[in-house]
Amino acid sequence: MSAPVYPDLSNQAPYSMPQPGAPYPQGGYGDPSKAPAPGFNMDYNPPPVMFQPGQGPEYGGPPGPAPGPQYGGPPGPAPGPQYGGPAEAMSPAVAPIGVPPGLEYLAQIDQILIHQKVELLEAFIGFETNNQYEIKNSLGQKIYKAKEKNDCCTRNCCGSLRSFDMKIKDNMDREVIRLIRPFRCVSCWCPCCLQEMEVQAPPGTTIGYVKQDWHPCLPQFSIQGANKETLMKLDGPCFACNCCGDVNFELKGKDGGKPIGRISKQWSGLLKEVFTDTDNFGIQFPLDLDVKMKAVLMGACFLIDFMFFEKVGEANQRSTVFS
């Protein structure tokens, strides 16, 4: 291995050193006739240092970051799940105050459509089955479903006066409303035992009643609260028969006056009206009406359907309060 070769510097002129008392050459020690090296700014003046790096506020410097727990400081925030920390607990959804669970949607609408489902066994042989309904919004979207619950003997022997429990469920198959109808008279000749329906939401908690008022000619009902205080009135026509037209039951305040809504039995067409007892109803009420009273009006609609538009076997539908 050969020894390294170093360049011969014996003939190179030594570096020039400034003489004592001699002025510095213009532009530093470089050649003033040549441009400065790239990136070198001859006019650069660094800003004055206001505080020393790392100097804290106790010495006039800016406040630095707080010390961490490893240096005796307070513990910082816990790392989130993206950094391996525990997941944050989700705060539970707050339900509107005073609204029974499952009825929150009713606060957003002022109209309900109720369609009774066609029962083939009932249509062909006249055997009465449990009534089933679909409850929809004004766009035809199903929001609830209702089904009557009782026994075969009650349905076919007591006819439209039969007692029943009706369960109303939401689209997640949760029961949100229960209607309870006891066996009662319906004729104006028996004023002491007229029709009544209890409305519960949720099941087991009574929120109101629908009670038939005695009148010699007109079907009238009181919409009552949980303590049986009358809040609204419902007045029907003297002859409740929808011959090619709708039958309207007007909703009014407890003192009467101008209608604020209605329950309408809608004309379903000649074939359905003659050969089945499948009915369509529409309910209109003020948008700001208490949600519980909207549910009670749904119960009133089912009670009206059984009283005047339910046909069992060869029995004709009722048209007045006299029969």
Image (tube, rainbow, N blue to C red):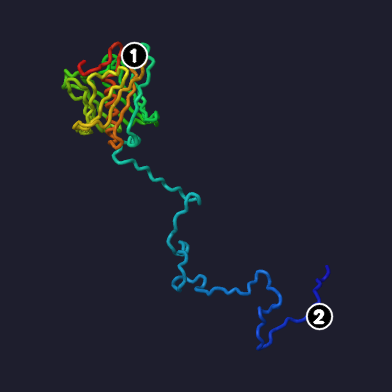
Check disc 2: other Cα within 10 Å, few if <14, some if 14-19, many if 20+. few
Residue 153 position, x and y percent, is 29, 15
> Relative to 27, does residue 76 appear above or below in the rendering?
above
Image-quadrant location for residue 272? top left
Residue lying farthest to the bottom in this orientation: 21
Query: Can residue 162 be seen in the rendering of this structure?
Result: no
Q: Which is nearer the eye, 181 or 298?
A: 298
Residue 238 position, x and y percent, is 22, 20
Residue 104 position, x and y percent, is 34, 36
Report the residue at 34% width, 24% height from top: 147
**Residue underneath mark 1:** 274
Judged by depth in the image, the label closer to the viewer, 2 or 1, is 1
Image-quadrant location for residue 230? top left
Report the residue at 68% width, 73% height from top: 36
Image-quadrant location for residue 122? top left
Q: Which quadrant would the N terminus be assigned to in this image?
A: bottom right
Residue 37 position, x and y percent, is 68, 71
- Residue type at mark 2 is Asn
Q: Which is nearer the eye, 101 or 225?
A: 225
Query: Residue 11, labelled with which disc?
Result: 2
Residue 12 appears left or right of 111? right
Q: Which is nearer the eye, 183 or 246?
A: 246
Q: Which quadrant would the C terminus be assigned to in this image?
A: top left
